[in-house]
Image (tube, rainbow, N blue to C red):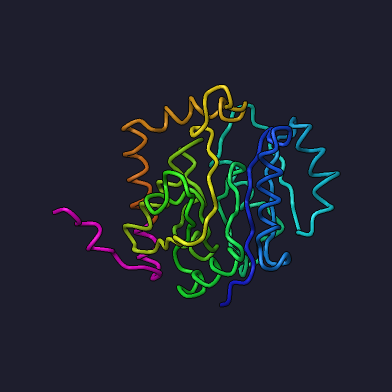
């Protein structure tokens, strides 16, 4: 199978006024090699009137196909948003990649789509690819992620671990990549993560403020243990289903 398109799955909340969402979307269509190749699916809160106005009146003018999935949560839940988009987006063709992208990310590398698709196709759609966030994660954690429905289905679990409303969903996938040897880092592809944690507190926006308590909770030892267990189950299923093998060198690294 040849993978030819990428669905940019993008949960967002009240980031039109401060320009973050607009900056993210414009960076996508300004750097993609082919506008038909990138499919944008936003997850928008039904009470976020500014974003709704943007997607109804401004986004249709952009040279890129888009879809909107609406949610009605009162507290943020990133795993739920990505899983909802995964299940409901119209861009669900088996040839189209699924992804985890934040509305505080900026696509910097021209032709990022070519590099991502080339790497995914080189591995026959097995595993996942992530780009350099040019911040603190880099090769250590896939804070952005591109994979296939083939891989997600073989984990026999939801796209994102529903235990975590913020943080840790990228750690889970990172662990899967280590255990099953199926994570591929693209150091030369930059999707810059302009995270609020890199800014003075007076520049934090409402969205970051809502997520901060959840980030602290999910960085607990209990959460880390649960993430490890979930990762092992997903990796084991990938191996059981014939997509990967145990990455013994990394599993026993340091012993």
Looking at the picture, how far across and down is residue 84, in whole percent? Answer: 62, 46
Q: Quadrant of the C terminus?
A: bottom left
Looking at the picture, how far across and down is residue 20, in whole percent? Answer: 66, 39
- Quick check: is 29 in the magenta stretch? no
Q: Is residue 45 above or below residue 36?
A: above
How many discs mark residues in the rendered view? 0
* 32 displayed left or right of 120: right
Instruction: Give the quarter of the image for residue 184.
Output: bottom left
The residue stretch that appears in magenta: 235-255
State the residue at coordinates (49%, 32%): 197
In the rendered image, the residue lying farthest to the top is: 202
Looking at the picture, how far across and down is residue 91, in whole percent? Answer: 69, 60
State the residue at coordinates (50%, 27%): 212
State the residue at coordinates (45%, 51%): 142
Looking at this view, is 188 or 167 the one in front?
188
Looking at the picture, how far across and down is residue 78, in whole percent? Answer: 55, 39
State the residue at coordinates (72%, 57%): 90
Instruction: Give the quarter of the image for residue 111.
Output: bottom right
Q: Quadrant of the N terminus?
A: bottom right
Q: Is residue 128 above or below residue 87?
A: below
Looking at this view, is 230 or 211 the one in front?
211
In the rendered image, the residue lying farthest to the bottom is: 1
* 237 displayed left or right of 78: left
In the rendered image, the residue lying farthest to the left is: 255
* 164 displayed left or right of 209: left
- Quick check: is 244 in the magenta stretch? yes
Looking at this view, is 94 or 56 the one in front?
56
């Amino acid at each position: 199978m040849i993978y030819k398109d990428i669905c940019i799955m993008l949960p967002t909340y009240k980031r039109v006024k401060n320009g973050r969402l607009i900056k993210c979307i414009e960076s996508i269509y300004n750097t993609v090699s082919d506008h038909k190749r990138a499919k944008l699916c936003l997850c928008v809160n039904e009470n976020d009137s500014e974003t709704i106005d943007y997607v109804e009146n401004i986004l249709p003018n952009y040279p890129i196909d888009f879809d909107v999935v609406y949610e009605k949560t009162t507290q943020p839940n990133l795993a739920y948003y990505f899983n909802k988009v995964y299940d409901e987006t119209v861009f669900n063709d088996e040839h189209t990649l699924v992804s985890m992208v934040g509305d505080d990310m900026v696509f910097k590398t021209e032709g990022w789509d070519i590099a991502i698709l080339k790497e995914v196709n080189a591995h026959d759609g097995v595993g996942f690819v992530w780009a350099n966030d040019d911040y603190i994660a880099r090769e250590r954690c896939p804070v952005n992620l591109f994979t296939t429905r083939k891989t997600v289905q073989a984990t026999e679990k939801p796209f994102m671990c529903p235990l975590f409303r913020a943080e840790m969903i990228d750690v889970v996938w990172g662990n899967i990549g280590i255990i099953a040897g199926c994570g591929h880092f693209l150091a030369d592809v930059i999707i810059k993560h302009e995270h609020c944690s890199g800014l003075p507190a007076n520049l934090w926006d409402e969205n970051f403020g809502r997520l901060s308590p959840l980030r602290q909770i999910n960085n607990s030892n209990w959460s880390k243990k649960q993430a490890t267990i979930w990762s092992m189950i997903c990796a084991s299923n990938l191996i059981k289903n014939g997509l990967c093998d145990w990455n013994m060198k990394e599993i026993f690294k340091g012993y």
